Image: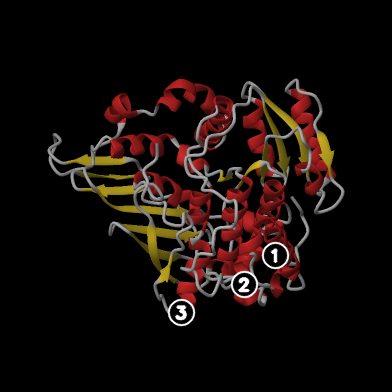
Amino acid sequence: MTDSSLNRRDLLKQALLTGAAITGASALSPLPAIAEDITAAAAPDAAPARTNFARTMKGVPFARHETVRIGIVGTGLRGRSVLSELLAIDNVRIVAVADTVADKAARAVKMCTDAGQAAPAVYTNGERDFERLVARDDIDFVYTATPWEWHVPVLLAALRNSKHCGAECPVGSTLRDLWALVDASEQAQRHCLQLENCNYGYNEMMVNRLVHDGVLGEVLYGSAAYLHDLRHILFEDRDEGLWRRGWHTRMNGNLYPTHGLGPVAWYMDLNAGDRMTYLVSMSTPERGLSLHREATVADRSNPKWNERYVTGDLNSSLIMTSKGRNILLQHDVSNPRPYSRLNGVQGTKGVFEDYPARIYVEGQQGGERFTGIDEWKKTHEHPLWTRVGELARKKGGHGGMDFIMAYRLVECMREGIVPDYDVYDAASWSAPMPLSQMSVAKGSAPMKFPDFTRGEWAKPKA
């Protein structure tokens, strides 16, 4: 949303005050110093009491909406990308957009009018003008694609105004913030979603069907990651380069856990029969960003030379679940390497591994060798991809998964059904961000996952 650097302490204090206003009895104590706050709460396994009148959001359907009216906060590269998907879906109306950069908001408005929609209202009067957007009474869903620091303030403001809402990844960076989102969603009885597009990838949705049809047997292990060379993007003097690199000066852990973890959480029915119980994490030394700066930033007076990068290049975490299953979770955006989310799952009858996609099922022809997945596509392609996959590949980013995600959100709201994920998934998929930092700081000590469902994780999905 903003191209300027942010004062994190002031921002998170404001986010906390907003959360406290919503959550009442479970209001959180004042924030400690930045170094402590960004590490997460002192007792990560402790659950604040559920507020008066708050009820679980598990299994709560949307109300039916003949037309889904959306407000967008943050119209940079990612915001406009998702806007493009939404404009390609029937019965969606973009009501309002907000950004601190007027030119970016104007580009979003033009996209809407070019698509035949009326020009949306525009909110560009400072960093908190989104508060006027979320207060409108003609918006059903608030979507935010801001820098990470702003996800929680926007989401809490939307929930305070009884709006369903969703954010890019991660939904929040501290356990305090994640609990505030859970409490606010429960009290408002509005959904707060981690809009994790990788859950809707072609392979991920097909593998989810393979798993739940028992093809791989009982699931024992999953592998998840975000391995993506972002050095060039991180050092740009525009867009994500203006804010995302800053996170590498703040914490040593996994900065972006949800892309790989979300799909594996679906394979394992986490928060719907199983849950993550603890995490251990370790990081390599930091070298990639420092070496890239040396190679590309010749002017030693450039402010980038005042930065000290602390995020280890490769962070590896192991997660244990209540059923004793294991998940490997990795993050590396600082080194030359092919893109991979790992996306693997091992069961008692076989194994799937991605990048490249390959499968082995016990007893298959050819012996103990991986084979391709083309034959499985004939029997286990997900119905969403069968139904709108061709349109998704034409209209959607990231191979079509972005369109499938947007289409499915709108479908759930139009039909009045339960969304595919909820605020508990949003919180638990983002929790490895603070938990990994805590574990690394404590010599890879185990860190307990909060039970954001407050005991309801064992209930299967309807």
Q: What's the CA distance linking mark 3 and mark 1?
A: 24 Å
In the image, is 69 to the left or to the right of 314? right
The three-letter amino acid code for the residue at tag 3 is Lys
| Residue designated by label 1 | 12
Report the mark closest to the observer, 3 or 1: 1
Residue, disc 2: 37
* Cα–Cα gap, marks 2 and 3: 16 Å
* CB-based contact (under 8 Å), mark 2 and mark 3: no
Specify the quadrant of the image occupied by residue 309: bottom right
* Label 2 to label 1: alpha-carbon separation: 9 Å
Which element type, helix, strand or loop, lies under badge 3?
loop
**Residues at discs 2 and 1 in contact (Cβ within 8 Å):** yes
Residue located farthest toward the right when viewing the structure as drawn: 125
How many discs appear? Answer: 3
Q: Position of residue 128 (x, y in %)?
A: 80, 53
The answer to whether residue 104 is seen in the rendering is no
Where is residue 109 drawn, in percent x and y?
Answer: 79, 32
Q: In which quarter of the image is the C terminus?
A: top left
Q: Which of 335 and 225 is in front in this view?
A: 225
Q: The residue under label 1 is which amino acid type?
A: Leu
Q: Which secondary structure lies at badge 1? A: helix
- Of discs 2 and 3, which sits in the foreground? 2
